C-alpha cells in the first residue's frame, strides 16, 4: 500500500473542499460550513498549513451569536437547492446561520492546532480564547442540567439519526411542516439517510424554535424534545479540560473552568445506565434512559473518565464486526449497517475513542481502532462512513473530516495523538 500517495490524496480532499477561509464537508451534499466538521478540518490543515488551520477556526467563529452560541451551520454564500437553508432558519444576522449548535470540540482542536506550531499559533490562540470561553459559558448556562449536556434538536448532537432520539421524537407534532424537497437524498441513496418521518420531525423542531424566537428558556419550556446526550457531555468535558490547559498556559485564570469540569464530572455519573452496564443518554422529559449503546457511549476515556466497566461491551462488539466501532450495538434491533448513525463506522468517532483509549493506557484497543480506520480509508477512500460488516463505503465521498483524521491519526505517518 502506497501510503505516501494516500497522504497526498487526503491533502487534495481538504484543498478541494476549501472555499477560501472555510471548508465544506463535501461538495453538493453539504455546501456550507459545519461546526464540528470545521474543527476537524482545522486539525487536518495543521499538519501542513498552520495559517489555513487558524483561518478555518476564526471563520467558524464569525458566526458566533452575541449570546456566545456558535451555530452548527454558517451560511457564508447562498447555495440554491439546499434544504434547510437560511430562509428556513430565519436568523436575522450576517452571516446567516442556523439556530442550533453542534458538538463543542473547537477548544480541543484549537489546542491541537496550537500544539502543532506554538510559535505561529500563539497570537491566534490569544485572540480565539475569549470566544471559546463565551461559547462554553453558553453551554453551561443554557444546556447543562444536573451536569449533563442537553440537546434541543437531533442535528445538534452531530449524530443526527441516532436511535437515542427516537422516543423523544414521538411527541413532535409534524402537522404544520408542509411540503419541502430534501437535497440530501439527491446525493445519497435514501436508504442510507434518515426517514421522511424523522425529517418531518426535524423540520418541526426548527419551526418550533423559530416561533420561540430562538429563546433558550422558551424552547426549554415548550419543546417536547430535550435529551441529555452522553456523547455531548463527554466531548464538552474534554473540551473544557483542553480549555483549562490553554488558560493555564496563557495565565488566563482557571477557577471558572475548573468549576465547569467538576459539574460535568458529576453529570457523567447520571449517564451511567446500571441496568445495561454502559453510559447512556437520558430523555429529560421523562427521565428515562434511551437504552442505546452507541459509539458515543465509548467516549468516556476521551473525556478523561477512567472507567473500564464498558470494556466488556467494547470487546464483544469488536468481536462481532470486521471493522469497529459501529455507531450502534449490532445486537440492537434498530441496527442498520448502512443507515446514517444506526450502524455504520465513522472515522471521526474511531479517532476520538481511540485517542481516549490510548491516553488511558488501553493501547492495544486503540491500535485496533486505528488500524481498522486506516484500512477502511486506504481501501475504500475518504467517505463519510463505512459498513462495519464488510467495510463498504457509504454517504458522501471526498469527505473533509475523513481526510483530516487520516492525516492526523489514521495514516502510518500520522502522530496518532493530539
Image (cartoon, rainbow, N blue to C red):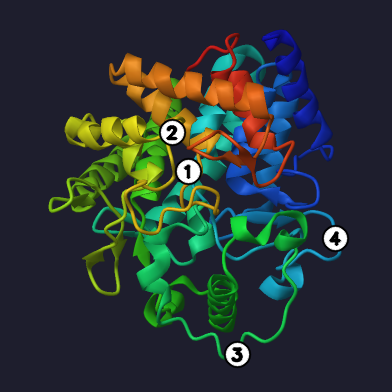
Residue 382 percent location from the top left of the image: 68, 32
For marks 3 and 1, give the CA distance.
38 Å
Helix, strand or loop at label 4? It is: loop
Which residue is tagged 3?
Answer: 176
Residue 221 percent location from the top left of the image: 38, 80
| Residue 243 - label | 2
Residue 5 percent location from the top left of the image: 76, 13
* Quarter of the N terminus within the rendering: top right
Q: Nearer the viewer, mark 3 or mark 4?
A: 3
- Quarter occupied by residue 297: top left
Front residue (pair 134, 370): 370
Q: Residues within 10 Å of mark 4 (few under 14, many from 20)?
A: few
Q: Nearer the viewer, mark 2 or mark 3?
A: 3
Q: Residue at x 32, y 36 (%)?
A: 317
For marks 1 and 4, give the CA distance.
30 Å
Q: Nearer the viewer, mark 1 or mark 4?
A: 4
Residues at discs 3 and 4 in contact (Cβ within 8 Å): no
Residues at discs 4 and 2 in contact (Cβ within 8 Å): no
Q: Is residue 220 above or below residue 262?
A: below
Which residue is tagged 4?
Answer: 78
Residues at discs 1 and 2 in contact (Cβ within 8 Å): yes
Which residue is tagged 1?
Answer: 133
Residue 192 percent location from the top left of the image: 60, 55
For marks 3 and 4, give the CA distance.
26 Å
Front residue (pair 163, 338): 338
Nearer-N-terminus badge (1/2): 1
Q: Residues within 10 Å of mark 1 (few under 14, many from 20)?
A: some
Nearer-N-terminus badge (1/4): 4
Amino acid at each position: 500500500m502506497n501510503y505516501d500517495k494516500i497522504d497526498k490524496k487526503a491533502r487534495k480532499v481538504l484543498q478541494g473542499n476549501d472555499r477560501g477561509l472555510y471548508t465544506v464537508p463535501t461538495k453538493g451534499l453539504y455546501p456550507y460550513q459545519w461546526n464540528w466538521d470545521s474543527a476537524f478540518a482545522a486539525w487536518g490543515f495543521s499538519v501542513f498549513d498552520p495559517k489555513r488551520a487558524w483561518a478555518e477556526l476564526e471563520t467558524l467563529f464569525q458566526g458566533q451569536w452575541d449570546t456566545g452560541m456558535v451555530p452548527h451551520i454558517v451560511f457564508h454564500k447562498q447555495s440554491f437547492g439546499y434544504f434547510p437553508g437560511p430562509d428556513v432558519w430565519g436568523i436575522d444576522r450576517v452571516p446567516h446561520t442556523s439556530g442550533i449548535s453542534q458538538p463543542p470540540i473547537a477548544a480541543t482542536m484549537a489546542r491541537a492546532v496550537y500544539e502543532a506550531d506554538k510559535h505561529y499559533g500563539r497570537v491566534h490562540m490569544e485572540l480565539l480564547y475569549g470566544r471559546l470561553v463565551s461559547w462554553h459559558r453558553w453551554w453551561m448556562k443554557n444546556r447543562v442540567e444536573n451536569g449533563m449536556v442537553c440537546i434541543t434538536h437531533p442535528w445538534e448532537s452531530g449524530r443526527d439519526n441516532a436511535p437515542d432520539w427516537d422516543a423523544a421524537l414521538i411527541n413532535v407534532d409534524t402537522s404544520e411542516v408542509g411540503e419541502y424537497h430534501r437535497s440530501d437524498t439527491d446525493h445519497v441513496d435514501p436508504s442510507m439517510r434518515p426517514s421522511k418521518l424523522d425529517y418531518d420531525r426535524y423540520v418541526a423542531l426548527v419551526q418550533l424554535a423559530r416561533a420561540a424566537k430562538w429563546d433558550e428558556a422558551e424552547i426549554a419550556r415548550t419543546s417536547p424534545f430535550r435529551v441529555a446526550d452522553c456523547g455531548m457531555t463527554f466531548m464538552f468535558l474534554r473540551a473544557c479540560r483542553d480549555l483549562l490547559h490553554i488558560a493555564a498556559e496563557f495565565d488566563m485564570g482557571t477557577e471558572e473552568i475548573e468549576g465547569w469540569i467538576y459539574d460535568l464530572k458529576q453529570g457523567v455519573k447520571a449517564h451511567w445506565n446500571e441496568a445495561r452496564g454502559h453510559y447512556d443518554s437520558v430523555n429529560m422529559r421523562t427521565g428515562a434512559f434511551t437504552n442505546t449503546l452507541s459509539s458515543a457511549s465509548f467516549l468516556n476515556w476521551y473525556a478523561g473518565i477512567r472507567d473500564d466497566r464498558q470494556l466488556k461491551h467494547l470487546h464483544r462488539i469488536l468481536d462481532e464486526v470486521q471493522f469497529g466501532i459501529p455507531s450502534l450495538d449490532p445486537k440492537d434491533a434498530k441496527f442498520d449497517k448502512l443507515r446514517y448513525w444506526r450502524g455504520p463506522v465513522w472515522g471521526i468517532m474511531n479517532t476520538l475513542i481511540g485517542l481516549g483509549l490510548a491516553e488511558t493506557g488501553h493501547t492495544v484497543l486503540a491500535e485496533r481502532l486505528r488500524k481498522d480506520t486506516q484500512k477502511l480509508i486506504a481501501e475504500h477512500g475518504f467517505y463519510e462512513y463505512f459498513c462495519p460488516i464488510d467495510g463498504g463505503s457509504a454517504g458522501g465521498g471526498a469527505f473533509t473530516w475523513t481526510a483530516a483524521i487520516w492525516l492526523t491519526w489514521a495514516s502510518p505517518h500520522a502522530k496518532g495523538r493530539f
